[in-house]
Image: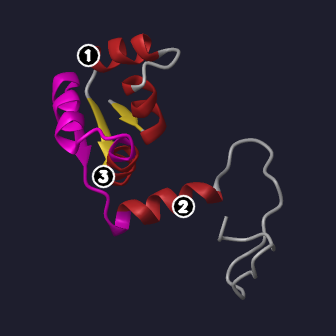
Amino acid sequence: MIVLDASALLALFNQEPGWQRLTGALVDDDSTISAVNYAEVLQKAGRVGVPAETIDAQLDELGVTVSPFGRLDARLAASLDRHPIGPQPHRPGLPGPCPQPGQPGLHR
């Protein structure tokens, strides 16, 4: 199973370096993209005049499904941050007051 993020799918659609390799992998394996990432792809495609129907047709041709992303999915994704791989930069802890513009924090 291949789980795509928006940047991978956009790279494929824009035929950026490596797109053929990704296409081959998608044809050979089941693949999906979360509804959150799918929405990002649609937003960016819409900015350049590509309709959602065109994106859907391409996903169908590649056999890519769109997976729902609910509350439990979000909690699982957020929990992955508790187990980072490799050195991590210092980040301010939560909870706390919302940072003001110009200060490091969630608004980036």
Q: CA distance from mark 2 to mark 1?
A: 31 Å
> At numbered mark 3, what does the secondary structure look like: helix, strand or loop?
helix
Percent x, y of residue 83: 64, 53
Q: Looking at the image, which residue is at 69% across and 78% down?
A: 94
Instruction: Look at the image and name its color scheme.
Output: secondary structure
Q: Which residue is mark 3?
A: 35
Q: Which residue is mark 1?
A: 27
The amino acid at mark 1 is: Val
- In this rendering, position of residue 67 left or right of residue 95: left
Magenta stretch: residue 70 in it? yes
Q: CA distance from mark 3 to mark 2?
A: 19 Å
The amino acid at mark 3 is: Ala
- In this rendering, position of residue 103 left or right of residue 67: right
The amino acid at mark 2 is: Ser
Q: Which residue is mark 2?
A: 79
Between 8 and 51, the residue placed more toward the observer is: 51
Between 106 and 80, the residue placed more toward the observer is: 106
* Range drawn in magenta: 45-72
Percent x, y of residue 62: 22, 23
Q: Pointer 3 and pointer 2: residues touching (CB < 8 Å)?
A: no
> At numbered mark 1, what does the secondary structure look like: helix, strand or loop?
helix
Magenta stretch: residue 25 in it? no
